[in-house]
Image (tube, rainbow, N blue to C red):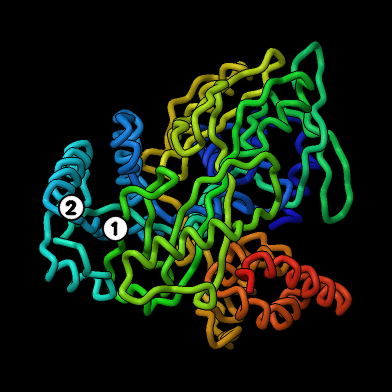
Amino acid sequence: MRDRALDAIRSTSRWDLVVIGGGATGLGAAVDAAARGHRTLLLEARDFAQGTSSRSTKLIHGGVRYLARGEVGLVREALRERVLLHRNAPRLVHARSFLVPCRGRLEGWKYRLGLKLYDALAGRESLGPSRWVGLDEALRLTPTLEARGLCGGVVYQDGQFDDARLAIALLKTLHHLGGTALNHAAVEGLWKGSGRVEGAILRDMEGGEERVVKARAFINATGVRVDAVRQLDDPNAAPMVRPSQGAHIVLDRSFLPGETAILVPKTRDGRVLFLIPWLDRVLVGTTDTPVSAIEDEPRPLRAEVAFLLEHAAEYLARDPSTADVRSQFAGLRPLVDAGSDRSTARLSREHVVSVSASGLVTITGGKWTTYRVMAADAVDRAEEVAGLKKVPCRTAHLRLLDDEESAPALASEEESIHPALPYRRSDLVRAVRFEMARNVEDVLARRTRCLFLDARASLEAAPLVADVLANALGRDAVWSREQVAWFQVLASRYLPDE
């Protein structure tokens, strides 16, 4: 697939639209543009969804806490998008029940009223009505809940998904629509003609090939790195993004064995805390920590992990410790900053589209749930810049291609890669053949979720994975050893400090 993408780039003199960035927003914009019939190319410097888009809290939701802050429009939009995603990717997006534990009647009424408003905003597209449950029912739904001090709780419905896998579904849909995407392909400069951005200087990070890719318009959808791309266009461009780190930890499923998640409405940093069943583990997150440096591999701070463990212990009968953490990870949110001195927890999650004097379209902000709306807004503006015929967005009811619909079974490769991981050799081969995976990290972090589920088990599986990939990609033993060595360095960042 990657060779075909390179051939398409070499043979196409000019694209209608080039999207820079292969996360949720970039993939969404490329799918939107291709669905409208535009010749579309997506370029990603590393791997699809390698940054923030694979490190979310795995929720497709309206955002209960945004409602508490009065951001009704954002919540209504997200709830509308939630049901569309549920319909368009039914194998990847599903409903999940959440319990909000309550201490005292006043707190109970507060959350009951708030979640009834949440239901009302969803309207006929609700995933189910919220309801009050007494303590006995709360303990039946979440048997490991710490009962001391609780009088019951409110149960409501929201959406859950696997972020990296939804990104791959968008990639496959883009290919199906005739679009082209290339990962491990960095944009190192922008080329201008008559004062307009007309080309991007592309470097293939695998083969080293460099060329200028021309297009009628360019969309900068690089998440927390949008300012770096904007400064390729204008070195004096003022920053748009104020990054914030969100950290998560992953625990064994025994800490929350039921099918109901827990939402803690308010923590010390002003965020909600989620404890969510996910891929036979329990995901706990998230924090909100302002950061000044943008790292490729952000690592949870000791204080963030301690914060998550402490708050989880308040609501679980068995207190988790650092030794119970199977994996830890962090992602950087691209929060739009208009010179505000507010904390990052209080900055809006709404998105912004801007167009530079030379025609570079930048889209940033937002969240996974609203990626489709963000994409549509960006493509609308890009059509104007490019002078393309305006075509209405066609993605509201576009079914996304997922694993079972787009890749054949590989029954001859059914050996498990590790006793603690729910994946087989066939998953590795499929990732290379049909999903553009290029190395051990691509496979263990994003095509499968091994690194996020159990970092130690992933380390143990890495040599086998490297050998399978070397065979599939035509690499040698030296490549395999280098891949394992690099993955050991990477995986160490997902292990908690002893």
Judged left or right of residue 147, residue 261 is: right
Residue 156 image position (x, y, % from top left): 21, 53
230 versus 404 height, above or below? above
- For the question of whether residue 88 can be seen, the reply is no
496 versus 114 height, above or below? below
Residue at 88%, 76% in the rendered image: 478
Judged left or right of residue 463, residue 271 is: left
Q: Indicate the secondary structure of the residue bearing disc 2.
A: loop
Residue 256 image position (x, y, % from top left): 34, 73
Q: Name the image quarter holding the C terminus.
A: bottom right
Residue 491 image position (x, y, % from top left): 68, 69
Callout 1 amino acid: Ala
Mark 1 and mark 2: Cα distance apart in space: 9 Å
Compare residues 233 and 13 and report the one nearer the observer.
Answer: 233
Image label count:
2
Is the residue marked by circle 2 packed among few (<14), some (14-19), or many (20+) residues within 10 Å?
some
Q: Indicate the secondary structure of the residue bearing disc 1.
A: strand
Q: Could you say which quadrant of the image residue 425 lies in?
A: bottom right
Disc 2 target residue = 128
Compare residues 219 and 238 and report the one nearer the observer.
Answer: 238
Badge 1 or badge 2: first in the primary sequence: 1
Callout 2 amino acid: Gly
Disc 1 target residue = 95
495 versus 305 height, above or below? below
Tag 1–tag 2 contact (CB < 8 Å): yes
